[in-house]
Amino acid sequence: MSLVVPAVLPSSRQELEEKLVLFSRIPSVNRVQIDVVDGRFATPASWPYSPSTKSDLVLGKPPELQRMIVDGYMLPQFDRIEYEIDLMCVNAEEAAAAWLALGARSFVFHAESTTSLPRLLSSVRTRLGAGDGSMSGLVSYGIALNISSDLALIERSLGEVAYVQFMGIVRIGRQGQPFDERVFEKVRVFRERHPAIPVQVDGGVSFGNAKKLLALGVSHLVVGSGILKAKDPAVALNALEELRSSFGV
């Protein structure tokens, strides 16, 4: 599995497809994160939640996403690339089911998006597949934690997931936000308590802070604008990927 997980926050289906084609052409990419923002848990809403009716948002079933499922659309090269859906949604379970039908196999649930994280994960595992955070290795689940949230919020659910994602920015759901160095201490404390649980950091990750994150034991770096806004996205991604050899991840 590659160190770097390129991320896309699509404003339209066309942008999503263009970015996925771009990433698929980079040989080192075998995992891609698609950010899904419903406009309720985080703002502004991303495609396919904008524009949508209020009832669509509550159900977690934007019309265009449903049409894609009916049409038999599948994410490009889903047999080679693991698509991870970062569910910044109130109704994350319904959204996960929709993306699963399109070929996604990894889902990140935000701890703050629900009143009961254990209940949400239990329901998801029953509906989409059970196992130690996976269904026979086909479906995996992660928990995301905001920079200002206490680690206690996820402690009870760690046995239900395959990894933890720490947000490195204050305003989630927006690419290009400044990196918040408080995540360093969060990762350090978590790794001391749970050295066997993989950790990834999403938001504000750059070549400048990646080395310290890796030194703290971060397993994967989720990078959006740092790659997409680079003069050559492939060069920027591979420069980060080459850090792997220095830290043995």
Image (cartoon, rainbow, N blue to C red):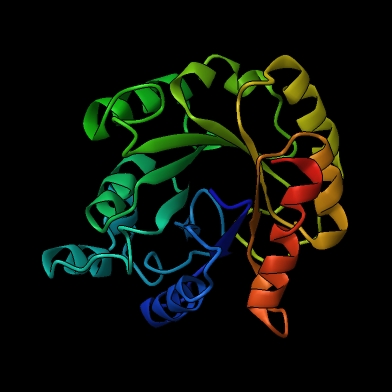
> Which residue lies at the image location 33% right of the left edge and 66% below the top edge?
77
Question: To which quarter of the image does residue 7 belong?
Answer: bottom right
Point out residue 126 in the picture as x, y percentages from the top left corner. 25, 25
In the figure, is residue 112 to the left or right of 50?
Answer: right
Give above or below for 118 relative to 107: above
> Which residue lies at the image location 40% right of the left edge and 59% below the top edge?
81
Q: Is residue 194 visible?
A: yes
Give above or below for 89 relative to 121: below
Q: Is residue 169 visible?
A: no
Check the picture and name the quadrant holding the C terminus. top right
**Residue with the most extreme bottom position:** 231
Point out residue 144 in the picture as x, y percentages from the top left corner. 58, 38
Point out residue 85 in the picture as x, y percentages from the top left corner. 43, 52
Question: To which quarter of the image does residue 183 belong?
Answer: top right
In the figure, is residue 215 to the left or right of 74?
Answer: right
Q: 7 and 37: which one is in front?
A: 7
Q: 4 and 11: which one is in front?
A: 4
Give above or below for 218 relative to 46: above
Point out residue 100 in the picture as x, y percentages from the top left corner. 27, 49
Tag count in the figure? Answer: 0
Q: 27 and 147: which one is in front?
A: 27
In the figure, is residue 31 to the left or right of 232?
Answer: left
Question: To which quarter of the image does residue 195 belong?
Answer: top right
> Which residue lies at the image location 32% right of the left edge and 69% below the top edge?
76
> Which residue lies at the image location 40% right of the left edge and 22% below the top edge?
132
Give above or below for 26 relative to 86: below
